[in-house]
Amino acid sequence: MEITSMTQAMQLHARILKSGGAYDSTHAQDFHKLFTFSALSPAGDLNYARHILRTLHTPNSFYYNTMIRAYSDSPDPTHAFALFLHMQNPDDPSVAVPQPDHFTYPFVLKACSKSGHARFGKQIHGLVFKSGVGSDRYINNALIHFYSASGDPSLALKVFDKMPDRDVVSWTSIIDGFVDNERPIEAIGLFTHMIENGIEPNEVTVASVLRACADTGALNTGKRIHSFVKEKDFSSNANVSTALIDMYAKCGCIDGALQVFDETIDKDVYVWTAIIAGLASHGLCMKAIEFFEDMKKSDVKMDERAITAVLSAYRNAGLVSEGLSFFRRLKKHKIRPTIQHYGCIVDMLTRAGRLKDAEEFIRKMPIEPDAVLWRTLIWGCKLLGDVERSERLVRELELLNMDSRDTGSYVLLENVYAATGKWEEKAKTRELMYQRGLMKPPACSRIEIEGVVHEFTAGDSRHDEATTVFEKLEEVEERLRGEGYNPIVSEVLLEIDDDEKASQLLHHSEKLAVSFGLMKSSPGSVIRIVKNLRSCEDCHSFMKLISKVYQRDIIVRDRIRFHHFSGGNCSCGDHW
Ligand code: ZN
Ligand code: ZN
């Protein structure tokens, strides 16, 4: 009989006990069945499963492994640790407890990644060594995943490098680990390596490396992977289609994204969301909204991500009243707005200069506003010069922030202090960031030249051709100054004089990347740059001028959106 509910499971258990049955050969199968159901079924009961395990006198490793697996999937994976420790040191030595085997470790490691217990995970790694299962592929794959999930892809790579035999899962895990930890260039390198080693990537690998291409703006590499997808007939996989659409959109090639979308047969909510978000980020807001209407007509159930994409379309287009009425209509669709949705509205009101409305909107929210929302508003106050409001909000944020781990809030405080000349407060904020181990991520711009991604950080001389790049940049600046370029020194938030500020501005990462682009790409071709943070006003006007003076189209994707610079103008209309 198949068990389908806990009631049935308990009835079966009662029957076994009544017949005086312990865990013996006659009842083994029934125990197995009711235990597996209690532990693993969504309709099961973990506590009951644990109770059954306690009553068994000689449970084999299957019972322990299943229980640990169930805990590792549960909301509190740390229960898995206690059971694992019990396997090593049973409280009652007279009870026979099986030793951990090669199935046990991967589940415990999963519990470590999910609960963020990195130290315990490292100890497990030590035990794996000692117990002589260190070459087991299944365990090593779990270790790669564990180290990646704990934010240490370099350690994951060490495990990977030492593996005697690696399968497609090992390669995919290591590539995914680097992508997740924002090291996409290494991820692309590993993918190339994988192909060279004759390992056939699967759909998961391909989706993962496409994400790396999207992050770096590596359009040519992305196109090569697209050909591979066609060749291997992966196109019917919705995850792959989503990744392709996202890659084309983020690499500035919205036509490519639209084409993939058209060719996708099974369009799930992710495919739709990817194209809507792509269109919105390219400023094609009306088209994004049109697609959303089409999506509603299809039988795909819309989810919160699709809503975020539409709201960002309204925001980017500056369609405030339309955006607000769309937001109000969400209730009709029985959708409860998420913090991201509120964020879009706050951003939209702020950009429209409606600071008071934005503040009221935040104060009336039914859910707790996070630091990001306040930050959006304070940035707006700073841009629009509403000093009174920004200082008042900053004081509130400071209180809110006493023990925050949100790096962005500190950076914002620093910026507000710098803008108002409060250097001492600025220094204190920085000090606090250091103390709490929260460093501001360095601004970094990437550009792909002939299939190789080059990375520049501000004032960075690590690039192989750094000297020539700096020379080229100076030459560009001189030419632009002749055309009326005047550095916007108020963008530099340091206590230094204007000359020095100008030279700091000059070495912003996107300026280095664009100079490199001018050096290395063929005349007339589009220069594509991806930046991890928001562009500053000075870099923005610098790019506009280059597009005119050098007659080159430049596409910059910053953290927020795309800028298509052409003939001295930008597609964002100077709103970003
Ligand atoms: Zn800049
Ligand atoms: Zn722009």
Image (spheres, helix red, strand yellow):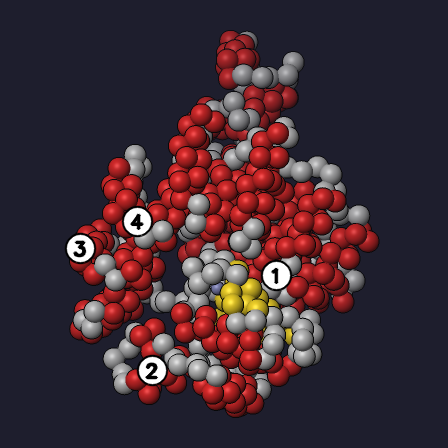
Residue at 39% from the left image edge and 48% from the top image edge: 348
Q: Earlier in the sequence, mark 3 or mark 4?
A: 4
Q: Which residue is mark 3?
A: 392
Q: Secondary structure at mark 3?
A: helix
Q: Position of residue 419 (x, y in %)?
A: 25, 69
For the C terminus, the image quarter is: bottom left
Q: Position of residue 168 (x, y in %)?
A: 71, 54
Q: Secondary structure at mark 2?
A: helix
Q: Nearer the viewer, residue 567 or 537?
A: 567
Q: Which mark is residue 354?
A: 4
Residue 469 higher or lower than 340, as above or below: below
Q: Earlier in the sequence, mark 3 or mark 2?
A: 3
* Pair 1/4: label in front: 4
The image quarter containing residue 205 is bottom right
Q: Position of residue 53 (x, y in %)?
A: 49, 28
Q: Earlier in the sequence, mark 2 or mark 1?
A: 1
Residue at 82% from the left image edge and 53% from the top image edge: 231
Tell me how far mark 4 sits from mark 2, CA to CA.
32 Å
Q: Earlier in the sequence, mark 1 or mark 4?
A: 1
User: Is residue 222 shown to the viewer in this render?
Assistant: yes
